[in-house]
Amino acid sequence: MPTYEYACEACGNEFERFQAITAGPLRKCPKCGKNKLRRLIGTGAGVIFKGSGFYETDYRSENYKKGAESEKKATEKPKDKADKKAEGKTKDSRPNSKAGSASTSKEEKKKTA
């Protein structure tokens, strides 16, 4: 149910009331009892669509997005360092020449046989 804001023009009383959408506006002020009550135009509320057709991340706050970005950057940096270390190891390591010639000779024997 929506919340409506009311103000009395006679006594200045302001209050909020939960009412059904189909309910008519109040006319009588609960404080002074005069029929000078007026419904104010509210700022409204944010609408959030729920269900299987909407993504949970569609309504993330800016703070959440900034936190996710900083977390992503923090996790990427160690991976980059690890990748550089792995690249350095592969450049330094050389295949064993005996193992390479042994595997080649076995394949050649299979082809000739």
Image: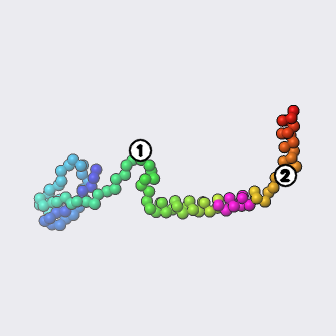
Q: Position of residue 55 (x, y in %)?
A: 44, 49
Which one is in front, 29 or 7? 7
Asked which quadrant contains residue 82, the reply is bottom right
Q: Residue at x 83, y 39 (%)?
A: 107
31 left or right of 93 in image? left
Q: Which residue is disc 1 drawn over?
A: 53
For marks 1 and 2, give the one nearer the viewer.
2
Which one is in front, 42 or 32? 42
Which one is in front, 96 or 86? 96
Q: Give yes or no for residue 82 being in the magenta stretch.
A: yes
44 left or right of 49 in image? left
Q: Which residue is disc 2 drawn over?
A: 96
* Residue type indicated by callout 1: Gly
Total label count?
A: 2
3 left or right of 81 in image? left
State yes or no: discs 1 and 2 in contact (Cβ < 8 Å). no
Nearer-N-terminus badge (1/2): 1
| Residue 35, disc | none
Find numbered disc 1 in the image and state the secondary structure of the residue it sits on.
Answer: loop
Q: Give yes or no for residue 97 being in the magenta stretch.
A: no
Q: Residue at x 87, y 42 (%)?
A: 105
Furthest residue in direction front, as rendered: 112
Find numbered disc 2 in the image and state the secondary structure of the residue it sits on.
Answer: loop
Q: Position of residue 74 (x, y in %)?
A: 59, 62
Region in magenta:
80-88
Q: Residue at x 43, y 53 (%)?
A: 58
Q: Residue at x 86, y 47 (%)?
A: 101
* Residue type indicated by callout 2: Asn
The quadrant of the image that shows the C terminus is: top right
Count neighbours of disc 2 (C-alpha within 10 A) and say few if under 14, some if 14 to 19, many if 20 or more.
Answer: few
Q: Position of residue 28 (x, y in %)?
A: 14, 57
